[in-house]
Amino acid sequence: SRMPSSGAALGFLVLVGVAEGVIKDAVSPARLQSLFHTPYRPEDSQHFQIPHSSSFAPKANMQFDLSYADGSELKGFNGEDIVHVGDVHGRAPFGLIYQCNSPDFNGVDGILGFGLPKPGVEGRELPRPLLWALTDRSDAATGNAAGIKRRFSFFSTDDAAELQLGGYDPKATSGEMLYTPSLSSTDFIVGVTSVRFGKTEADAQELLQFNQPTGGEYLPAILDSGTSCLVLPGTDLGGRLTNKPFDDFTRLWATDKSFYITIGGKTFSLPYSSWYLSRTRQTCVQPSPVGMQGLLIGDVFFRSYLVEFDMTSRLRPVLGIAPLSASFAPAESSSFGHFDLRGEPLQKLRLLRGEETMFGPEHARRLREVDEVPIFNKKG
C-alpha cells in the first residue's frame, strides 16, 4: 500500500472505497472541500472495489466521521476482509472512506495505521488496529500472523520508507536501541524535557523555557510517522512556558542549525537535512494547533532514527529509538528474516520523573521475526 507522510494519521487501516449500494450520506462534499486550496482528486486513487471480493463482509452500521486539526475530514464505514501486509496476512477489519476532503489522499490508496486500540465508545466504533487484529487471529485458514509479536519499526527517506513487523532489523541502525515507556496506554507519547536549536549542541538555545523550573518539567510529545513535520508549541501554553517556542525558532532560523531533543535523559539531534525539505524548499517545522498542550514529532525524526513501537506490554507501549544507518536502504520488496539481538549493549540512563527512562534491551538474548515492507513515500 502507498502511505502519505503528511496530513491526518489514523491508528487503523483505512482505504479509499466505493460505498454505492452500501451506505448513503447527505453532507455536502463542497463544504468540506472548501477547507483546502488544493482539491482532493478521487480519480487519482485506486479504489477498493467491493464487488471484486468474495470474502469481504461490510459492517455498514459501524460508521465513522473523523475530523483533524489540519481541517481533514473523513467519513466512512467498517468492513472486514483478508488483508496482506508483505508476507503477513489474515482476516482483519478496516475502514472504507466514501467522503474525503484532504489533498493528502491524492494518488494515495489509503492509510496503513498501526496505532493502539482506543478505549470506550471510540474503540467500539473504529476498526481494531491492523497489527492487533492480525495477531489476534490463530486460525491458520485465514492468517499466518499469530506468531508475530506486537512490535513494529519504521524509518523513512526523502522518497521511500520501510516498515518492519515483529521487531527491528539491527542492520538498519548505527548504534544501540534505547527504550522508554510511553506516557499513555492509548498513544505513543514520550516526555520531552528540552528542545534546543543551534549550530552545535553546546551553543544551541533552549526553545522550551519553563516557567519557574524545578528540574522535573517536561512536555508530552506524540511520535507519529504519519505527520510530516516537527510541531512546536505556538503559544506559552497558558503560562507554563515563558516563551513561544515556534516564534523563537523562526527568529533563530538558519540553514546550518540542528534541533537537539531530549527524551528520557538522552539527546537526539535532528539535522537541517531532516527538518528542511530540499525538494520542495519547505521548512518542515510548524506551530501547534490551538489547544494542543505539547509537541508532535513527525516524519522528519524518522529520517534520522529507526523507531520501534513495542505493544507487547499489557500496561502501556514501549518506544525504542536508534540512530539510522546511513548505508541501510529501504527494502525494494518484502522480505522475512530472523534477527538475533544477542550483541546489543545493555545500558540504563537517568530517570525522568521517577519513571521515564531510556534503557537498553531488558534481555541479553532475544530473537525477533521482522517482516520488512517497502512503502512509497510520495509526499517526501
Image (cartoon, rainbow, N blue to C red):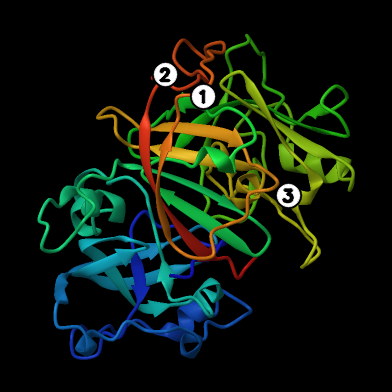
- The secondary element bearing badge 2 is classed as loop
- Say which quarter of the image contains residue 51: bottom left
Of the residues under marks 1 and 2, which one precedes in the sequence? Answer: 1
Of the residues under marks 3 and 1, which one precedes in the sequence? Answer: 3
Would residue 81 be seen by someone viewing this image from the given angle? yes
Q: Is residue 48 above or below residue 148?
A: below
Please give the name of the residue rendered at 36% of the width and 53% of the height, measured from the top-left corner: 11
Q: Where's residue 278, x and y in %?
A: 80, 61
Q: Local crowd at mark 3 within 10 Å, few (<14), some, or many (≥20)?
A: many
Q: Amino acid at mark 1?
A: Glu
Q: Nearer the viewer, mark 2 or mark 3?
A: 2
- The secondary element bearing badge 1 is classed as loop
Where's the C terminus, which quadrant?
Answer: bottom right
Q: Is residue 340 above or below residue 350?
A: below
Mark-to-mark CA distance, 1 and 2: 7 Å
Query: What residue did someone put label 2 on?
Result: 364
Q: Local crowd at mark 2 within 10 Å, few (<14), some, or many (≥20)?
A: few
Horizontal arrangement in the rendering, residue 121 relative to residue 243 (left or right): left
- The secondary element bearing badge 3 is classed as helix
Please give the name of the residue rendered at 88% of the width and 34% of the height, measured from the top-left corner: 199
Residue 61 or residue 316, whichever sits in front: 316
Query: What residue did someone put label 1 on?
Result: 344
Q: Amino acid at mark 2?
A: Ala
Query: What residue did someone put label 3 on?
Result: 274
Q: Amino acid at mark 3?
A: Ser
Q: Where's residue 62, x and y in %?
A: 18, 67
Mark-to-mark CA distance, 3 and 1: 27 Å
Where's the N terminus, which quadrant?
Answer: bottom left
Of the residues under marks 2 and 3, which one precedes in the sequence? Answer: 3
Please give the name of the residue rendered at 64% of the width and 40% of the height, measured from the top-left corner: 233
